[in-house]
Image (cartoon, coloured by chain):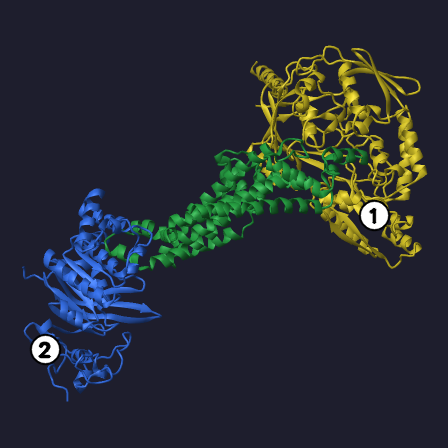
Chain colours: A green, B blue, C yellow
Amino acid sequence: MLPYILRRLIHLIPVMIGVTLCSFLLLKLAPGDPAEVLAGIEANPEVIEAIRRKHGLDQPLPVQYFYYLGNLMLGDFGKSISTGLDVGPMMWRALIVTLKLSALGLVLALVVGIVIGAVAAVRQNSFFDSTSMLFALFGAAMPNFWLGLLLMWTLSVTFPIFPAGGGTDLYSLILPAITLGTGAMALIARMTRASMLEVIRQDYIRTAYANGLSPPIVIIRHALKNAMIPISTVIGLQFGYLLGGSVATEIVFAVPGVGQLLVDGILARDYPVVQSTMLMVAIIFVLVNLITDISYAYFDPRIRLK
Amino acid sequence: MSSQPLLSVRDLQTQFVSDGRVIKAVDGVSFDVRPGEILGIVGESGSGKSVTALSVMGLIPWPPGRVVGGSIMFEGEDLRAKTQAQMRRVRGAGIAMVFQEPRTAMNPVFRIGEQMTEVIMLHRKMSRAEASGEARSMLDRVHIAEPGRVMSAYPFELSGGMLQRVMIAMELALRPRLLIADEPTTALDVTIQAQILRLIRELHDEFDLTVLFITHDLGVIAQLCDRVMVMYAGAVVELSPVDALFHSPAHPYTRKLLAAVPSVVDTRNTLRSIAGDVPDLADLPPGCRFYDRCDLRQPECRLAIPDLRKVGEDHTARCVLPNAISP
Amino acid sequence: MTRHVAWLGGAVALGLMTMLPAFADEPQKGGTITIAIAGDPEHFDPPDHINIGALTIRMVHEGLVRFKPFSDQAEIEPSLAESWDVSEDGKTWTFTLRDGVTFHDGTPFTSAAVKHYFDRVMTGEMTNKGSPLFRGLVESYQAPDEQTIVFTLSQPHSYFLHRLAHEASFFNSPEAERVHGEDFIFNPVGTGPFRFVEFVPGQHVILERNAAYWRGEPYLDQVIQKPVREVGTRLLQLEAGQLHVAPLLSEEMIPRLEESPDLESVVTLSNRAFRISLNTTKKPFDDIRVRQALNYAINRDELTEFLFGGLAVAIPGGLSPKTAGFADIEPYPYDPDRARELLEQAEYGDGFEFTLTLHGAGTIMPKDLPLAETIQQYLQAIGVTMNLQTMEWAAMRHEGRQPREENKLEASFEQWPPSTGEASWVFTATAHTNAVPPNGVNRAFYSSPVFDHLLATSMAQRDNAMRDEFLRGAQLVLREDAPWVFLLTPSVVAGKRSNVQNFVFDPVGGVSTWANEQTWLRQ
């Protein structure tokens, strides 16, 4: 197991280089530069040039890139061109919020999705089965943006149960987490249902019943653990999508996470912010997938021991 | 030994619904299982042997199947009248079942020890430590060399033969009065098969266990059983002590079955099979179900299903001309 | 007898009732107001500010003069300067500073602070915004004593006071800059009604009452700014009570604001003058008749009525009616026949095709896409096909800055809101010959010696009436030359909770809104 983990971690290096290089080049390809943005609408060319000089934007591209990379090795994520503040602290602050939001979204998606999928499988072709699968389809199709505003309008304004965004505490993150997690929840519900239908047909389930175990125990203990095996492979990917999908949700709910940071950074052509943030997101995505692959072994001992 | 049958099935009918057709898998089956005996049920695939066993256990899944008639008396109580909660107490502790394919019969993601301990704790009111000890000692009883290693193993780590022993150990640890074994050796190779049969015999003797043994293999019947029930197309066609079955089979089907068993002294080059097919269980003929394939068929056979007629000591057959010599 | 008592009772009751509104409107001390801002503030250094940080600067800092709050025009009134004198030739300005004013850190406000500001802005690298306001204008400045500052200008300038009223001219405490070093841009210390408490990026900016404020103690305890980027969310948070003031809403939200008893809409005419800039270096826009034709082809009244719900005003030239120096001349009438006639004369009777570049998202210029699509139809009616090209904001600015030979824009949506509230700031940047890209935003590449001369002359006037006359002339020339298709000035819509009183909405017509010492909250 350990050499496997080490090998996967070494793969991170080309990923890091690729991500920073891509963010750098893509942003440079877009017309406009941060000096123009920074100088404001009423600026003249001298002001813009001076800003360029101050931030080293007049250097040749490879120099700019390697300068950034060099600092990165030393743990320095650079300074934001818009604010002059260190990118590191602002990025960690935003990352923690987005991770909280994404994790909460994933937990909600898992809990609700697995329960719905399992019940739908056990009561196959019932009213619950058809309506819940329809509901799941709806959830996958609805755009985050629209769902977010709808939830805010009903549950923050019309029935003031939740805050209308803006906070980073758990209570404020519930509506955005629901918004974010709905798509993943739909997928997980469908997968759980399919997987459970397979599992409850198996011989060992019949053995469990034949030995007098009650349906709740058979479903929850014996069936579900087996049904989780294919789902655990998907969890890592789903978390990645949640991380990315948080942008629209964060804007709607005014959550100060990575999404907002990236949008502001891209519009302002703030290279250090965009590069560093994209890099951290990519690393987190790779690590989460690694953890998922390792956890897969927890669910399926056949993988572990072979 | 009391004279009251341990299990008494009368006129059991179990049906399956598929594509709008009703399949009568078990159509009027009646038999007793006497305390302490090993009763064999023999018949070809589709004869209704497994469905009978599952019906007794109350494990016919709806959809698509259902027990639609008859009574199943176990230890004097009607199982069909019991609630689900009551049946759960019977399953395992009253009647235990061992299935055909041991490799898929246990949950692949739990260790053997966990699975055994779970059911032992459920039925025998022991603590986890006590149940674990009980499991270990049962594994020992079924001649498993390293019970500790097996307890912490996962099912995929063990062979088929080993797993079937484990299944038997698990079921017997629950101290059932009746053990139903549904073709437990069919999926195993011949040497292992012999070991398992020997083991069942041993345990029957030691624990005073009543066994209902389902198989399609007449050789196994000869080795193990006290009495035999022959099933064909969802019905019982002959019920007899084992010696009588082999020396004087009464029903034409039974005789053909016996004739089909290849023998070492046989000089023929081809296997003797029974011509024709089993009737469609959704579209059964009004008369004797063996009619189309029977050498001795009479016109009256087509009109009504014969009753089980006494043909010897404790020996019945469902035929109008039992014991008739074929022309 | 009883009838007299009844009359008396009635009179007393009536008298009491008339006094009730007075009681109800007595300002209450205390409370916290939360305002939505459109993103994170960049920082709080007055001469180097951009957009969002300016809001804090308006509440924390002050300058020599200010725009009068609660007024419809950009009127100048004294602030840290009590009074001023101008010399005969208009070049020497002497300001007498207010006595006894202190910065939030306790240090006194004196001419040293003013000198410190100008030292910073007039020398060193021009990386801050304060410099374009004063460089080339202020020749020298002296502080003969603590209460006096004297400026010598290179030429008389009719809008010098407007420049001083701009928040980029506001003063930060020199002592605080010394103490905080580089970090002073995140630790603003001014003389204003509120003092800076903290800024947590992504979360809030918190300001609290400055009890020692020289105009009088403010009523509010605290002012909190929270970034809310999405306009729908701003409205919902306002309804839910999480915000007290939500600026930058849209007209469609007005009925909803009016319906609710707890909310109010605040609609003010803005300082934005929407126009289409036509690149006069590219055919057919090099022909004045074509440009005029486009101006005749548009029904401005219809646009303001239907697209903006009557909340916009058609403009004759490049200025909003709220901008000082705006001349009330006739806008182009809607006359498609005349338009077609002009095209015939210019030998474009069969029409032509061109591309309009715009941002399209409605964030920088509200409703720009529907506006463009409607104009498309007006032009189609006279045989002109206008294609639309949407571009991201930074990309569009980049394209617009390209010099004559490389500039690919044929026509673009433009607006230039003057934060100084006066016309010269607009025209110098957008219509003067020296302002063609890349030096400025004269994207029409318009060059008229007459216009330049009139503009320069207006700026050199000492008398406001004379100044306005010359500006009027310049605007007439502009209208005649029609380098732009003149459109309209929209209104700015904001929402506030009804119990917020005396909130300041930008007197020069910008989108900013802020609290001052007179703002209070009915609890």
In this view of the protein, can residue C486 be seen by the observer?
Answer: yes
Q: Is A64 placed left or right of B83 in the picture?
A: right
| C41 up-or-down from C27: above or below | below
What whole-number distance in Å separates the C-alpha atoms at marks 1 and 2?
A: 110 Å
Chain bearing mark 2: B
Q: Circle 1 sits in a helix, a strand or a loop, which is it?
A: loop
Query: Where's residue C408, x and y in %?
Result: 81, 49
* Image disc number at residue C406: 1
Q: Is B30 placed left or right of C507 in the picture?
A: left
Tell me which amino acid carries mark 1. Answer: Glu
Q: Residues within 10 Å of mark 1 (few under 14, many from 20)?
A: few
Residue at far bottom of view: B327
| B322 up-or-down from C50: above or below | below
| C341 up-or-down from C515: above or below | below
Query: Where's residue B149, x and y in %?
Result: 26, 50
Q: Which residue is mark 2?
A: B247
